[in-house]
Image: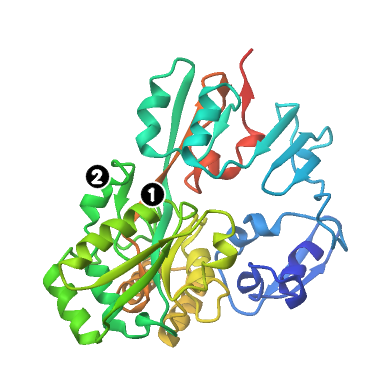
Amino acid sequence: MFSILRHKDPATASKAKTLADQIDSVKATVPNEVTVVLTAPNADLPVILGTFHFHIVKDGTSDFAAAVGTGPYRLKEFKPGVRTVVVRNENYWKPGKPYLDEIEFVGIGDESARVNALLSGGMDLVASVNPRAVARVKGTPGYAIFTTQSGQYSDLVMRRDVGPGANPDFALAMKHLFDREQMKKTIALDYAVVANDQPIDPTNRFHFKGLPQRAFDLDKAKYHLQKSGVSGAVPVVASPAAMYSVEIGLVLQQTAQSIGLNLDIKRMPADGYWSNHWLNSPVGFGNVNPRPSADTILTQFFKSDAAWNESRWKSPQFDQLLLAARAETDLARRTQMYADMQTLIHGEAGIGIPLFLASIDGHSTKLKGLSPIPLGGLMGYAFAEHVWLDA
């Protein structure tokens, strides 16, 4: 009860508050059973309660410096951004798991330094390998690549409340500047699929295949730019923290010159990017990890009052559809509602999504047990419970 309800408390400042606000009450009914009452129907309640925010914590917990104790490992050392050491939880509730006695996590923000750490034997598993380093990892004896295609994306965010994105024609001009096929081949090296400026990817059962693909069209981009009246240099914030955003920004910058638009790409360091620039810059890049359901990603990133509504796009029609889709158990009707929501985002939101990105992880061939989970790399970030080292 505590673990669920704490997300509703504004003092907790939970990023899952928009999900928890759907819960009206949680009551203990009989031993080992709680009854959850919602403010409105939601067929995806089990999915919501399965997201990492809702992991069980001890009743009354307010200090999380020592972690919580219900996972496969116990915290031994925690130095944010430097290293974390965890040891096997002998009382873990899944029999026989986990397999490893200890795991050390190290934060290495630089892509090439991560790969070097792996290939020098300092690491057994590294996340977010640049596709240009894949051949090097594969060509080194004892190392391999683990790829997971998912709904992860880096998006161009044009805030609708301030800056040039307040004019919808500017946002449309920018979306038509995406040469998606070129970006897929030259930036992601085909470790991606083409996206269409909406966040529901082809691995999701509610992906709307019938939405016409927005084309790379310089004439339309120029038309909408002139209609917007935007002129002068437009600062665009990018960072290695948002996967491929620097590369996408530079391609956009070059393309924009042909329609008379000056994009000033400002490369920011990965450290502090999410707190200092994401959600704060009028035009810049974000990066969204996969979510377990269409409702979850739409609620967290596109609902009008969501804390992570990147472009501050507000649509009463969208909000109504979102609530109605939660309550709809007829699959055909629910599918149509999600199609309508994707169409609205595609047309109106200040979000440009050129690609859905594959997660590329590098690992020692001694590491066993890896299998793709489309919630992201590192087995949807849950690898620790499943892997072991071959002697």
What crowding class fits label 1: few (fewer than 14 Cα within 10 Å), some (14-19), or many (20 or more)?
Answer: many
Q: Which residue is mark 2?
A: 185
In the picture, measured across the screen, residue 300 lies left or right of residue 208, that is: right
Looking at this view, is 70 or 37 the one in front?
70
Residue under the image location 34 percent in, 42 percent down:
191
Helix, strand or loop under label 2: helix
Which amino acid does the dot numbered 1 rest on? Leu
Q: CA distance from mark 2 to mark 1?
A: 12 Å
Horizontal and vertical percent position of residue 249: 33, 59
Looking at this view, is 162 or 214 the one in front?
162
What crowding class fits label 2: few (fewer than 14 Cα within 10 Å), some (14-19), or many (20 or more)?
Answer: few
Residue 213 visible in the current orientation: no
Q: Quick one: which residue is furthest to the left in this view?
A: 219
Horizontal and vertical percent position of residue 144: 45, 24
Q: Quadrant of residue 167?
A: bottom left
Horizontal and vertical percent position of residue 42: 57, 70
Q: Quadrant of residue 136?
A: top left
In the picture, measured across the screen, residue 14 lies left or right of residue 110, that is: right
Of labels 2 and 1, earlier in sequence is 2
Q: Quick one: which residue is furthest to the top in this view?
A: 391
In the picture, measured across the screen, residue 187 lies left or right of residue 361, that is: left
Q: Which residue is mark 1?
A: 357
**In this figure, which colouring scheme has been used for the structure?**
rainbow
Q: Quadrant of residue 83?
A: top right
In the picture, measured across the screen, residue 326 lies left or right of residue 77, that is: left
Residue 248 visible in the current orientation: yes
Looking at this view, is 257 or 372 the one in front?
257
Horizontal and vertical percent position of residue 199: 40, 63
> Disc 2 vs disc 1: which is toward the camera?
2
**Rendered position, 143 above or below 212:** above
Which amino acid does the dot numbered 2 rest on? Lys
Helix, strand or loop under label 1: strand
